[in-house]
Image (tube, rainbow, N blue to C red):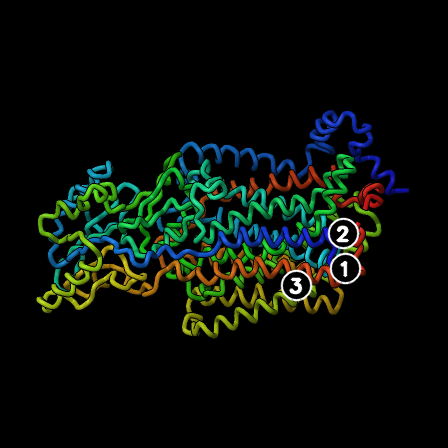
Amino acid sequence: MRRTKMNNSYPTALDHDGNSIWKFLVSELKPKGKILTPFNIISIPVMVLGLVLIIIRFWKGIGSITNLSQEIPWGLWIGFDVVTGVAFAGGAYVLTFMVYILNMRKYHSIVRVTVLNGFLAYVFYAGALLLDLGRPWHVINPIIGNGFGTSSVLFLVAWHFLLYMIAELIEFSPAVAEWLGARKAHKILSGMTIAAVIFGITLSTLHQSGLGALYLMAKDKIHPLWYSEFIPVMFFVSSIFAGLSMVIFEGSITHKVFSRQISEKNHHAQQVIIHGLSKICAGAMFAYFFLQMLVFIHGQHWNLLNTPMGYWYLLEMLGFVLLPMILFLVSYRTKNITMIKVAAIITMLGVILNRLNVTVIGFRWDMAIRYVPSWMEFAVTLAVIFTEIWIFRWVINRMPVLRDSPSWANNNK
Amino acid sequence: MGLNRRGFFKLLGITGMTLAIGKETIASSGSKRGVEFYGVLYDAARCKGCRGCEFDCAEAHGLKEPLPTKNIKSIRTTDETCNTVVNTCKTSKGDVHVKRQCMHCNEPACVAACLTQAMHKTTMGPVTWDGDKCMGCRYCMVSCPFDIPKFEFHSANPKIQKCDMCFERLKTGESPACAFNCPYEALLYGKRKNLIREAHRRIYEKPELYVDQIYGEHDAGGTGWLYLSPVPIEELGLNTTLQQSSYPALTKGFLYSVPTIFVLLPAFLTGIFQALKSTHPYEEDEDE
């Protein structure tokens, strides 16, 4: 009974007989719920500030609000927004692989929200790339063929971002169809899911590693403890546990914030899911740690360990890979869900640390004048993240993402 | 559970797409074997540091006039307002001057990095930049081992600035402005092969004047600009730790693996999916 009531409080287009679809869409654009929540009070000023900064950036150039220089052409916006953001979005391809390909049904209830998260992450964090492009009006060039730079890793990454966004949109589209009450479209779009999943996993494998491969040519610029020809493999493997840690982290937040939308059954399932994911994280992290050790030993960089950068490297490897790996393993054994969440947060910090070490901190580590992002770069980054959360909330409150699908959608198959 | 018609077309579609996209991502190295590039031989033993080339370069490219020598206190690099600088280095043989500009690599990292082919290695040798293609991503700057491409960070319509070896002049049969105007013949424009021969001749004839090394002959896979020096190259502030093979070679392995993964992974995934499908909740979805 409770569930029926819940579903009624979130209307779909069908309730309007499907005739007034535009009226419905307009009514859906209006905010639901309280305006003056703590989150809104914090996020709105940041987003306004971000918008002002973005206007200044397009008016006066990238240098007007960033600390980038001729020697450090890529900073926080690439190293964090794009490279780290995409790693965290890796949960979508890992989970669709587990659920749709490996048929691990117990994770099914979180696929939709994870795909939505992944899709929005790509739209916003890859979208943030536009802010960093000096000549963003030419962003379409590698797509339309005003120069197919096929020897460029970035060409591959650009195409993959585009194609992967489409694949994720297809994976998510049944939820949109359910929201709009479009039964025919729902049937067609659901039928495309498996193809989109297979295509999406392939794309993810290549561009998660591709983001690392971008830095292969910067051989002399990246600290040797972080540079090896295996950066692409490292980026790929770490995207598995980066994505899953994000799923654990994001899941525990959404289950609190959107608690009313989630059925009793799925609330219980969440515990089982987090428990299961901790084992996978531990496994992926073990593989990653092992690879890192192999690369380190082959690199013969023992002498570099006893330097400030060496201590920094050890902190990353021991404190943010080995430690959370053990935490995942122990808390999997003891079924300690809280500890798993702590491990997920440490893992995420570790992934941020690793991506920034390759792209920002270890990049030109030997320069006399170091790059430190300006407060404005942080503000724009924060504004992008907040905007994404706004859109995420908007979708969650309208489409059946956390809620169960309407009954016709299940019969439709 | 055989392959039905729909499944077959789906597979065919995926494979087709794969081949189409996979083919595009195959690396092309940017090296053009058989083509003889032009280049410039710079002889640091002849250069008197008059900086005339800096002024000629600025004039030829419409850039702002360089600072007068008395205002220069430190070692400079090229930037978005000047494509070449001549520095004076304190060395074991006293003051030696060294000119810096784009090296015009045989296999340039910036060209391999560029996703729109805005950076282009011309068949004559110069590496040029095309503003109609460039999206300002600055990946060329990340990749260039010589830190040559410079970006106008304070412009709403920023350009990448770097030496283009006066490509417009070369096309009309002239030599680069700096080489054409150098009063001490420290700069010699010609076919790279001949320049290397000439450099070896100078070293052979005056071994006491030069160190026995041509910077750029093999560095970074070979560069269009070649340096002769009276002192060990590192004393001139040039980077001597660069690898001897080309920089685009570093990403070749990754790029070559792309078509393979693009073909094999979907097939592999489809296989697993089919194998585990009998107990699959979406079975009806596929076989209706």
Q: Which image quarter holds the N terminus of chain B?
A: bottom right
Q: Secondary structure beneath disc 3?
A: helix
Chain identity of mark 2: B
Is B26 drawn above or below residue B231 in the view shown? Answer: above
Residue at 80% of width from left, 49% of height from top?
Answer: B288
Tell me how many marks there are.
3
Residue B147, image x, y percentages: 33, 52
List the residue tagged with mark 2: B286
List the residue tagged with mark 1: B277
**C-alpha separation, residue under disc 3 versus residue under disc 1:** 25 Å
Check if mark 1's residue and mark 2's residue have beta carbons within 8 Å: yes
Query: Is there one chain holding both mark 3 and mark 1?
Result: no
Disc 3 marks a residue whose amino acid type is Cys
Check if mark 3's residue and mark 2's residue have beta carbons within 8 Å: no
Residue A314, image x, y percentages: 50, 68
Query: Looking at this view, is B206 or A70 the one in front?
Result: B206
**C-alpha separation, residue under disc 1 versus residue under disc 2:** 10 Å
Disc 2 marks a residue whose amino acid type is Glu
Q: Is residue A246 visible?
A: no
Judge from the rendering whether residue B44 lies leftward or rightward of residue B113; answer left or right: left
List the residue tagged with mark 3: A281
Residue at 75% of width from left, 49% of height from top?
Answer: A255
Residue A385, image x, y percentages: 58, 43
Query: Looking at this view, is A291 or B262 the one in front?
Result: B262
Chain identity of mark 1: B
Q: Secondary structure beneath disc 1?
A: helix
Q: Is residue B149 visible?
A: yes
